Amino acid sequence: MLLIVFCHFVYWSHRNFVESPPLDLNKLLLQSFAQGKVGVICFFSISAWFLSSESTAGELKKNCRRVWILEREVLFWSWVLFFTTLFIYKPPTDWHSYLMLLFPLSSSVWWYITSYAIFLLVSPFLTKGLKALSRSQHAALCIIIVLLWGVMTLIPGIDMNLGGALTVSIMLVLYPIITYVKWYVGTPKLKTGLILLATGFALIMLSYAVLPRLSGTLGLPINYYADGFWRLPVISAGFGLTIIFLNIHFYSRSINFIASSTVAVYLISAYPPLGSRIFGLVPEPFSVWHAGVFVLLVFIICIGADCIRRGLFALTVDRNRGKLFDRLSSFCTSLNFFKQLSSLDHMNSIEQQQ
Protein backbone atom coordinates (compact mmCIF):
# COMPACT_ATOMS: atom_id res chain seq x y z
CA MET A 1 0.00 0.00 0.00
CA LEU A 2 2.92 2.33 0.67
CA LEU A 3 4.06 1.79 -2.94
CA ILE A 4 0.59 2.80 -4.16
CA VAL A 5 0.50 5.95 -2.03
CA PHE A 6 4.06 6.82 -3.10
CA CYS A 7 3.01 6.45 -6.74
CA HIS A 8 0.05 8.81 -6.24
CA PHE A 9 2.34 11.31 -4.54
CA VAL A 10 4.85 11.36 -7.38
CA TYR A 11 2.63 11.15 -10.44
CA TRP A 12 -0.44 13.08 -9.32
CA SER A 13 1.27 16.25 -8.13
CA HIS A 14 4.96 16.13 -9.05
CA ARG A 15 5.19 14.35 -12.40
CA ASN A 16 6.73 17.31 -14.23
CA PHE A 17 9.46 17.66 -11.62
CA VAL A 18 10.29 13.95 -11.47
CA GLU A 19 10.39 13.44 -15.24
CA SER A 20 12.10 16.72 -16.14
CA PRO A 21 15.75 16.59 -17.24
CA PRO A 22 18.43 16.19 -16.13
CA LEU A 23 17.93 12.73 -14.67
CA ASP A 24 19.89 12.40 -11.43
CA LEU A 25 20.02 9.69 -8.77
CA ASN A 26 17.29 11.34 -6.69
CA LYS A 27 14.81 11.45 -9.58
CA LEU A 28 15.74 7.91 -10.61
CA LEU A 29 14.96 6.66 -7.09
CA LEU A 30 11.69 8.61 -6.99
CA GLN A 31 10.59 7.06 -10.27
CA SER A 32 11.73 3.57 -9.29
CA PHE A 33 10.00 3.52 -5.90
CA ALA A 34 6.78 5.11 -7.11
CA GLN A 35 5.59 1.67 -8.20
CA GLY A 36 1.90 1.68 -7.45
CA LYS A 37 1.42 -0.90 -10.19
CA VAL A 38 3.71 -3.32 -8.32
CA GLY A 39 1.70 -2.66 -5.16
CA VAL A 40 -1.55 -3.41 -7.00
CA ILE A 41 -0.19 -6.71 -8.38
CA CYS A 42 0.94 -7.70 -4.87
CA PHE A 43 -2.35 -6.59 -3.29
CA PHE A 44 -4.39 -8.62 -5.78
CA SER A 45 -2.09 -11.67 -5.83
CA ILE A 46 -2.31 -12.18 -2.07
CA SER A 47 -6.12 -11.92 -2.19
CA ALA A 48 -6.35 -14.29 -5.17
CA TRP A 49 -3.99 -16.77 -3.49
CA PHE A 50 -6.34 -17.27 -0.56
CA LEU A 51 -9.52 -17.04 -2.63
CA SER A 52 -8.31 -19.89 -4.87
CA SER A 53 -7.98 -22.20 -1.86
CA GLU A 54 -11.66 -21.95 -0.99
CA SER A 55 -14.21 -24.54 -2.03
CA THR A 56 -16.33 -23.52 -5.02
CA ALA A 57 -19.44 -24.67 -3.16
CA GLY A 58 -21.27 -21.55 -2.03
CA GLU A 59 -18.37 -19.35 -3.14
CA LEU A 60 -20.61 -17.01 -5.14
CA LYS A 61 -22.70 -16.25 -2.07
CA LYS A 62 -19.54 -15.68 0.01
CA ASN A 63 -18.14 -13.30 -2.58
CA CYS A 64 -21.43 -11.41 -2.90
CA ARG A 65 -21.33 -10.98 0.86
CA ARG A 66 -17.75 -9.67 0.60
CA VAL A 67 -18.84 -7.13 -2.02
CA TRP A 68 -21.78 -6.11 0.16
CA ILE A 69 -19.51 -5.46 3.16
CA LEU A 70 -16.96 -3.68 0.97
CA GLU A 71 -19.69 -1.45 -0.45
CA ARG A 72 -20.57 -0.18 3.04
CA GLU A 73 -17.04 1.06 3.65
CA VAL A 74 -16.73 2.52 0.15
CA LEU A 75 -20.08 4.32 0.53
CA PHE A 76 -19.04 5.73 3.91
CA TRP A 77 -15.80 7.19 2.57
CA SER A 78 -17.50 8.41 -0.58
CA TRP A 79 -19.83 10.59 1.51
CA VAL A 80 -17.17 11.72 3.98
CA LEU A 81 -14.63 12.64 1.31
CA PHE A 82 -17.22 14.31 -0.92
CA PHE A 83 -18.40 16.66 1.81
CA THR A 84 -14.80 17.24 2.93
CA THR A 85 -13.85 18.46 -0.53
CA LEU A 86 -16.77 20.92 -0.48
CA PHE A 87 -14.63 23.03 1.85
CA ILE A 88 -11.89 23.12 -0.83
CA TYR A 89 -13.80 23.28 -4.10
CA LYS A 90 -17.15 24.62 -5.23
CA PRO A 91 -20.09 22.18 -5.15
CA PRO A 92 -20.29 20.26 -8.45
CA THR A 93 -23.10 21.16 -10.80
CA ASP A 94 -23.10 18.01 -12.95
CA TRP A 95 -25.45 15.16 -12.09
CA HIS A 96 -22.71 12.54 -12.60
CA SER A 97 -20.84 13.71 -9.47
CA TYR A 98 -23.91 13.09 -7.34
CA LEU A 99 -24.52 9.75 -9.03
CA MET A 100 -20.96 8.76 -8.11
CA LEU A 101 -21.70 9.84 -4.55
CA LEU A 102 -24.65 7.45 -4.31
CA PHE A 103 -23.09 4.56 -6.25
CA PRO A 104 -19.31 4.80 -5.82
CA LEU A 105 -18.67 1.12 -6.44
CA SER A 106 -20.70 0.97 -9.66
CA SER A 107 -19.43 4.29 -11.02
CA SER A 108 -15.74 3.37 -10.54
CA VAL A 109 -14.74 6.29 -8.33
CA TRP A 110 -11.86 4.03 -7.26
CA TRP A 111 -10.98 1.85 -10.22
CA TYR A 112 -9.29 -0.92 -8.21
CA ILE A 113 -12.23 -1.36 -5.83
CA THR A 114 -14.68 -1.59 -8.72
CA SER A 115 -12.45 -4.01 -10.61
CA TYR A 116 -11.91 -6.19 -7.55
CA ALA A 117 -15.65 -6.32 -6.84
CA ILE A 118 -16.29 -7.48 -10.41
CA PHE A 119 -13.55 -10.07 -10.04
CA LEU A 120 -15.13 -11.39 -6.83
CA LEU A 121 -18.42 -11.89 -8.66
CA VAL A 122 -16.95 -13.77 -11.63
CA SER A 123 -14.13 -15.65 -9.85
CA PRO A 124 -16.31 -18.63 -8.73
CA PHE A 125 -17.11 -19.41 -12.37
CA LEU A 126 -13.51 -18.84 -13.44
CA THR A 127 -12.26 -21.10 -10.64
CA LYS A 128 -14.68 -23.83 -11.62
CA GLY A 129 -13.53 -23.61 -15.24
CA LEU A 130 -9.84 -23.75 -14.32
CA LYS A 131 -10.41 -26.77 -12.07
CA ALA A 132 -12.02 -28.54 -15.00
CA LEU A 133 -8.73 -28.26 -16.90
CA SER A 134 -6.04 -30.89 -16.55
CA ARG A 135 -2.70 -29.83 -15.10
CA SER A 136 -1.06 -29.82 -18.54
CA GLN A 137 -3.87 -27.72 -20.03
CA HIS A 138 -3.67 -25.27 -17.14
CA ALA A 139 0.12 -25.06 -17.59
CA ALA A 140 -0.30 -24.40 -21.32
CA LEU A 141 -2.69 -21.54 -20.55
CA CYS A 142 -0.14 -20.02 -18.15
CA ILE A 143 2.62 -20.29 -20.75
CA ILE A 144 0.48 -18.48 -23.32
CA ILE A 145 -0.28 -15.71 -20.81
CA VAL A 146 3.41 -15.27 -19.92
CA LEU A 147 4.43 -15.19 -23.59
CA LEU A 148 1.75 -12.69 -24.62
CA TRP A 149 1.82 -10.31 -21.64
CA GLY A 150 5.32 -11.00 -20.36
CA VAL A 151 7.87 -11.67 -23.05
CA MET A 152 6.09 -10.00 -25.99
CA THR A 153 5.60 -6.71 -24.13
CA LEU A 154 9.37 -6.38 -23.68
CA ILE A 155 9.58 -5.63 -27.43
CA PRO A 156 9.24 -1.85 -27.96
CA GLY A 157 5.99 -0.95 -29.66
CA ILE A 158 4.16 -4.20 -28.82
CA ASP A 159 1.75 -2.99 -26.18
CA MET A 160 -0.84 -5.74 -25.54
CA ASN A 161 -2.65 -3.11 -23.49
CA LEU A 162 -4.79 -4.47 -20.65
CA GLY A 163 -5.25 -1.06 -19.06
CA GLY A 164 -8.06 1.39 -19.48
CA ALA A 165 -10.39 2.83 -16.90
CA LEU A 166 -11.49 -0.56 -15.62
CA THR A 167 -8.60 -3.00 -15.34
CA VAL A 168 -10.40 -6.10 -14.11
CA SER A 169 -8.91 -7.67 -17.26
CA ILE A 170 -5.43 -7.87 -15.71
CA MET A 171 -6.93 -9.70 -12.71
CA LEU A 172 -8.58 -12.22 -15.00
CA VAL A 173 -5.29 -12.74 -16.87
CA LEU A 174 -3.14 -13.18 -13.74
CA TYR A 175 -5.59 -15.43 -11.89
CA PRO A 176 -4.80 -18.60 -13.91
CA ILE A 177 -1.09 -18.22 -13.07
CA ILE A 178 -1.79 -17.72 -9.37
CA THR A 179 -4.15 -20.71 -9.21
CA TYR A 180 -1.70 -22.97 -11.05
CA VAL A 181 1.06 -22.19 -8.56
CA LYS A 182 -1.36 -22.59 -5.65
CA TRP A 183 -2.84 -25.91 -6.75
CA TYR A 184 0.11 -27.69 -8.34
CA VAL A 185 3.35 -26.09 -7.13
CA GLY A 186 2.67 -24.80 -3.63
CA THR A 187 4.22 -21.77 -1.98
CA PRO A 188 7.45 -20.89 -3.82
CA LYS A 189 10.62 -20.52 -1.79
CA LEU A 190 11.70 -17.19 -0.33
CA LYS A 191 14.74 -17.21 -2.61
CA THR A 192 12.45 -17.30 -5.65
CA GLY A 193 10.55 -14.28 -4.38
CA LEU A 194 13.75 -12.33 -3.77
CA ILE A 195 15.03 -13.12 -7.26
CA LEU A 196 11.75 -12.06 -8.91
CA LEU A 197 11.56 -8.87 -6.84
CA ALA A 198 15.19 -7.92 -7.55
CA THR A 199 14.82 -8.72 -11.26
CA GLY A 200 11.61 -6.71 -11.59
CA PHE A 201 12.95 -3.61 -9.86
CA ALA A 202 16.28 -3.88 -11.69
CA LEU A 203 14.45 -3.87 -15.04
CA ILE A 204 12.28 -0.95 -13.91
CA MET A 205 15.30 1.12 -12.82
CA LEU A 206 17.14 0.19 -16.01
CA SER A 207 14.21 1.31 -18.14
CA TYR A 208 14.04 4.66 -16.33
CA ALA A 209 17.78 5.15 -16.86
CA VAL A 210 17.87 4.12 -20.54
CA LEU A 211 14.55 5.22 -22.08
CA PRO A 212 15.12 9.00 -21.64
CA ARG A 213 18.18 8.65 -23.85
CA LEU A 214 16.33 6.62 -26.47
CA SER A 215 12.98 8.41 -26.38
CA GLY A 216 13.74 10.24 -29.60
CA THR A 217 14.63 7.02 -31.41
CA LEU A 218 11.99 4.65 -30.00
CA GLY A 219 9.29 7.22 -29.30
CA LEU A 220 8.43 5.60 -25.96
CA PRO A 221 7.57 7.38 -22.68
CA ILE A 222 10.15 6.96 -19.92
CA ASN A 223 7.72 4.93 -17.81
CA TYR A 224 6.83 2.56 -20.67
CA TYR A 225 8.00 -0.60 -18.89
CA ALA A 226 6.97 0.51 -15.38
CA ASP A 227 3.47 1.87 -15.91
CA GLY A 228 1.69 -1.21 -17.22
CA PHE A 229 0.26 -3.96 -15.00
CA TRP A 230 0.74 -6.43 -17.84
CA ARG A 231 4.46 -5.81 -18.43
CA LEU A 232 7.05 -8.32 -17.26
CA PRO A 233 9.04 -6.03 -14.90
CA VAL A 234 5.90 -5.05 -12.97
CA ILE A 235 4.53 -8.60 -12.81
CA SER A 236 7.92 -9.97 -11.75
CA ALA A 237 8.31 -7.45 -8.92
CA GLY A 238 4.68 -7.87 -7.81
CA PHE A 239 4.83 -11.66 -7.74
CA GLY A 240 8.21 -11.54 -6.00
CA LEU A 241 6.84 -9.32 -3.25
CA THR A 242 3.83 -11.63 -2.88
CA ILE A 243 6.03 -14.72 -2.51
CA ILE A 244 8.14 -12.97 0.14
CA PHE A 245 5.03 -12.16 2.18
CA LEU A 246 3.69 -15.71 1.81
CA ASN A 247 6.95 -17.05 3.30
CA ILE A 248 6.81 -14.80 6.36
CA HIS A 249 4.88 -16.55 9.13
CA PHE A 250 4.20 -14.73 12.38
CA TYR A 251 1.26 -13.24 14.23
CA SER A 252 1.09 -9.59 15.20
CA ARG A 253 -2.05 -7.97 16.49
CA SER A 254 -0.70 -4.52 15.59
CA ILE A 255 0.04 -5.46 11.98
CA ASN A 256 -3.37 -7.11 11.60
CA PHE A 257 -4.97 -3.97 13.00
CA ILE A 258 -3.16 -1.78 10.46
CA ALA A 259 -3.87 -4.23 7.62
CA SER A 260 -7.60 -3.95 8.32
CA SER A 261 -7.40 -0.26 7.41
CA THR A 262 -5.28 -0.45 4.27
CA VAL A 263 -8.37 -0.24 2.05
CA ALA A 264 -9.22 3.06 3.73
CA VAL A 265 -5.68 4.32 3.05
CA TYR A 266 -6.27 3.68 -0.63
CA LEU A 267 -9.77 5.21 -0.62
CA ILE A 268 -8.64 8.42 1.08
CA SER A 269 -5.33 8.96 -0.69
CA ALA A 270 -6.68 7.97 -4.11
CA TYR A 271 -9.80 10.14 -3.96
CA PRO A 272 -9.10 12.37 -7.00
CA PRO A 273 -10.23 15.81 -5.71
CA LEU A 274 -8.47 15.36 -2.36
CA GLY A 275 -5.37 13.29 -3.13
CA SER A 276 -3.79 15.70 -5.60
CA ARG A 277 -4.39 18.59 -3.21
CA ILE A 278 -2.74 16.78 -0.28
CA PHE A 279 0.30 15.59 -2.24
CA GLY A 280 0.73 19.05 -3.75
CA LEU A 281 1.56 20.45 -0.30
CA VAL A 282 5.18 19.33 -0.66
CA PRO A 283 7.23 22.04 -2.38
CA GLU A 284 9.62 21.18 -5.18
CA PRO A 285 12.41 20.20 -5.39
CA PHE A 286 12.42 17.44 -2.78
CA SER A 287 14.47 14.35 -2.05
CA VAL A 288 13.33 10.74 -1.99
CA TRP A 289 13.68 10.82 1.81
CA HIS A 290 11.35 13.82 2.16
CA ALA A 291 8.85 12.08 -0.11
CA GLY A 292 9.07 8.88 1.94
CA VAL A 293 8.46 10.69 5.23
CA PHE A 294 5.47 12.58 3.80
CA VAL A 295 3.96 9.39 2.33
CA LEU A 296 4.39 7.62 5.67
CA LEU A 297 2.71 10.56 7.43
CA VAL A 298 -0.25 10.39 5.03
CA PHE A 299 -0.44 6.64 5.64
CA ILE A 300 -0.56 7.12 9.43
CA ILE A 301 -3.21 9.86 9.21
CA CYS A 302 -5.39 7.66 6.97
CA ILE A 303 -5.08 4.76 9.43
CA GLY A 304 -6.11 7.09 12.25
CA ALA A 305 -9.11 8.33 10.27
CA ASP A 306 -10.21 4.76 9.60
CA CYS A 307 -9.98 3.97 13.31
CA ILE A 308 -12.80 6.48 13.79
CA ARG A 309 -14.79 4.81 11.00
CA ARG A 310 -14.26 1.37 12.53
CA GLY A 311 -15.41 2.66 15.90
CA LEU A 312 -18.59 4.08 14.37
CA PHE A 313 -19.22 0.85 12.47
CA ALA A 314 -18.70 -1.21 15.65
CA LEU A 315 -21.47 0.77 17.34
CA THR A 316 -23.85 0.60 14.35
CA VAL A 317 -23.74 -1.57 11.22
CA ASP A 318 -21.14 -4.07 12.48
CA ARG A 319 -23.22 -5.09 15.48
CA ASN A 320 -24.93 -7.53 13.11
CA ARG A 321 -22.34 -7.69 10.34
CA GLY A 322 -23.89 -8.87 7.08
CA LYS A 323 -27.25 -9.70 8.66
CA LEU A 324 -29.22 -7.64 6.13
CA PHE A 325 -27.39 -9.36 3.28
CA ASP A 326 -28.20 -12.78 4.75
CA ARG A 327 -31.87 -11.86 4.88
CA LEU A 328 -31.89 -10.63 1.28
CA SER A 329 -29.99 -13.72 0.19
CA SER A 330 -32.49 -16.01 1.90
CA PHE A 331 -35.36 -14.16 0.24
CA CYS A 332 -33.76 -14.38 -3.23
CA THR A 333 -32.96 -18.08 -2.92
CA SER A 334 -36.58 -18.74 -1.93
CA LEU A 335 -37.81 -17.44 -5.29
CA ASN A 336 -38.67 -20.01 -7.98
CA PHE A 337 -36.23 -18.50 -10.48
CA PHE A 338 -33.23 -19.08 -8.21
CA LYS A 339 -34.50 -22.53 -7.22
CA GLN A 340 -34.56 -23.53 -10.89
CA LEU A 341 -31.03 -22.23 -11.41
CA SER A 342 -29.86 -24.17 -8.38
CA SER A 343 -31.46 -27.38 -9.61
CA LEU A 344 -29.91 -26.96 -13.07
CA ASP A 345 -26.48 -26.44 -11.53
CA HIS A 346 -26.97 -29.58 -9.41
CA MET A 347 -27.96 -31.61 -12.49
CA ASN A 348 -24.94 -30.35 -14.44
CA SER A 349 -22.60 -31.34 -11.63
CA ILE A 350 -24.08 -34.86 -11.56
CA GLU A 351 -23.67 -35.20 -15.35
CA GLN A 352 -20.02 -34.12 -15.11
CA GLN A 353 -19.35 -36.73 -12.44
CA GLN A 354 -20.89 -39.43 -14.61
Image (cartoon, rainbow, N blue to C red):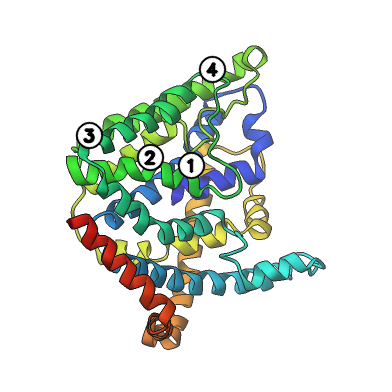
* Mark 3 residue type: Ser
Q: Which residue is mark 4?
A: 210
Q: Which residue is mark 2?
A: 238
* Mark 4 residue type: Val
Real-space Cα distance between discs 1 and 3? 30 Å
Where residue 323 sits, quadrant-wise, is: bottom left
* Mark 1 residue type: Lys
Please tell me which of labels 1 and 3 falls first in the chain. Answer: 1
Q: Which residue is mark 3?
A: 136
Q: Residues within 10 Å of mark 1 (few under 14, many from 20)?
A: many
Can residue 128 be seen at all in this image of the molecule? yes
Residue visible at 51% across and 39% down? 34
In this picture, residue 102 sits left or right of residue 333? right
Task: Residue 143 in the image: state x and y as whole percent.
Answer: 33, 29
Real-space Cα distance between discs 2 and 4? 22 Å
Could you tell me which secondary element the residue under label 4 belongs to?
helix
Task: Residue 181 in the image: state x and y as whole percent.
Answer: 24, 41
Residue visible at 48% across and 42% down? 37
In the rendered structure, are the residues bearing label 1 and label 2 in contact, judged by CB atoms less than 8 Å apart?
Answer: yes
Q: Which residue is mark 1?
A: 37
Please tell me which of labels 2 and 4 falls first in the chain. Answer: 4
Real-space Cα distance between discs 2 and 3? 25 Å
Residue nearest the observer in this picture, 313 or 169: 169
Residue visible at 36% across and 56% down? 125
Real-space Cα distance between discs 4 and 1? 20 Å
